[in-house]
Image (cartoon, rainbow, N blue to C red):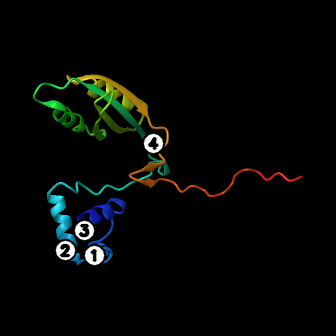
Amino acid sequence: MRDKILQSLSRNARLSSEDLAVMLDSSPEEIREMIHDMEEEGIICGYPTLINWDKTGDERVTAVIEVKTAPERGRGFDKIAARIYQFDEVKDVYLMSGNFDFTVIIDGSSMKEVARFVTQKLAPMESVVSCATYFVLKKYKQHGIPLEKLRDTDERQLITP
């Protein structure tokens, strides 16, 4: 039942304990207790809201940054990740396999602000060897949710003889 609760909340964090109880043939009290336990265990870490910022007047730039590091002996990647995710600009940090060590995703108000973050905060870190920054041009889907409904119309013009 725990997995079903997690799957349901990952799709819609606004589901109430009562709604989940009906869906999972359980009691609201049991659902509340299970959710509380998962929050305490760090399984459920938060309830973010997915916002399509393109639909607001708020100008934002999202950047994906590949970071190569030289981890210190005995400290590994966790210590470096913790230093990186402490920055307010950082939305996500992932340890990667392949040609670089971390993917860092940040939001800024402009490309200049992102560049300032990379050059003044991220790149100068002792363990950072190199960074490659990519700017997101348009977001179509986040957290498994399409940000815009696709129009189901054919925009080609009809040509008749």
> Which residue has dot 2 on it?
30
Of the numbered discs 3 and 4, the one sitting upstream in the chain is 3
**Residue displayed at 16% across by 31% down:** 76
Image disc number at residue 59: 4
Q: Quadrant of residue 79?
A: top left
Q: Nearer the viewer, mark 4 or mark 2?
A: 2
Which is nearer the eye, 115 or 32?
32
Q: What kind of element bears circle 2?
A: helix
* Residue neighbourhood size for the residue with mark 3, other residues' Cα within 10 Å, grouped as few (<14), some (14–19), many (≥20): few
Q: Are marks 4 and 2 in contact (CB under 8 Å)?
A: no
Dots 2, 1 in contact, CB < 8 A: yes
Q: Amino acid at mark 2?
A: Glu
Residue density around tag 1, few if under 14, some if 14–19, many if 20 or more, within 10 Å: some
Could you tell me if the residues under marks 4 and 1 are in contact, i.e. CB atoms within 8 Å? no
Q: Earlier in the sequence, mark 2 or mark 1?
A: 1
What amino acid type should be assigned to the residue bearing mark 3? Met
